Amino acid sequence: MVVQNTMELIEKLGGLNGNRAVNSDLI
């Protein structure tokens, strides 16, 4: 739950850059 919330915040705050960073980490 905490991880999901953190990722959602990163996506909202980071925008496209945040999404790319998260995707890179997941892959």
Image: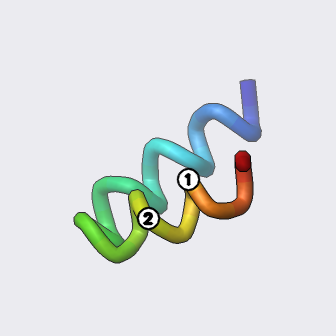
**Residue 18 x %, y %:** 41, 69
Left or right of 25: which side holds 16? left
Left or right of 16: which side holds 25? right
For image coordinates 47% across by 61% down, the residue present is 10
Q: Which mark is residue 5?
A: none
Colour option used? rainbow
**Residue 24 x %, y %:** 63, 62
For image coordinates 44% across by 53% down, the residue present is 9
Q: Quadrant of residue 11?
A: bottom left
Label 2: which secondary element: helix
Category of crowding for the residue at label 1, using alpha-carbon neighbours closer than 10 angstroms: few (below 14), some (14–19), many (at least 20): few
Check contact, mark 1 vs mark 2: CB within 8 A: yes
Label 1: which secondary element: helix
For image coordinates 25% across by 66% down, the residue present is 16
Q: Which residue is mark 1?
A: 23
Compared to 12, does 5 lie above or below?
Answer: above
Compared to 14, does 8 lie above or below?
Answer: above
Q: Which residue is mark 2?
A: 20
**Residue 5 x %, y %:** 58, 38
In this view, the residue in front, 11 or 21, is 21
In this view, the residue in front, 11 or 23, is 23
Category of crowding for the residue at label 2, using alpha-carbon neighbours closer than 10 angstroms: few (below 14), some (14–19), many (at least 20): few
Please, what is the three-letter code of the amino acid marked with disc 1? Asn
Please, what is the three-letter code of the amino acid marked with disc 2? Arg
Left or right of 17: which side holds 3? right
In this view, the residue in front, 24 or 6, is 24
The alpha-carbon separation of the residues under discs 1 and 2 comes to 5 Å
Left or right of 20: which side holds 3? right
For image coordinates 34% across by 75% down, the residue present is 17
Compared to 7, does 24 lie above or below?
Answer: below
Quarter of the rendering occupied by the N terminus: top right
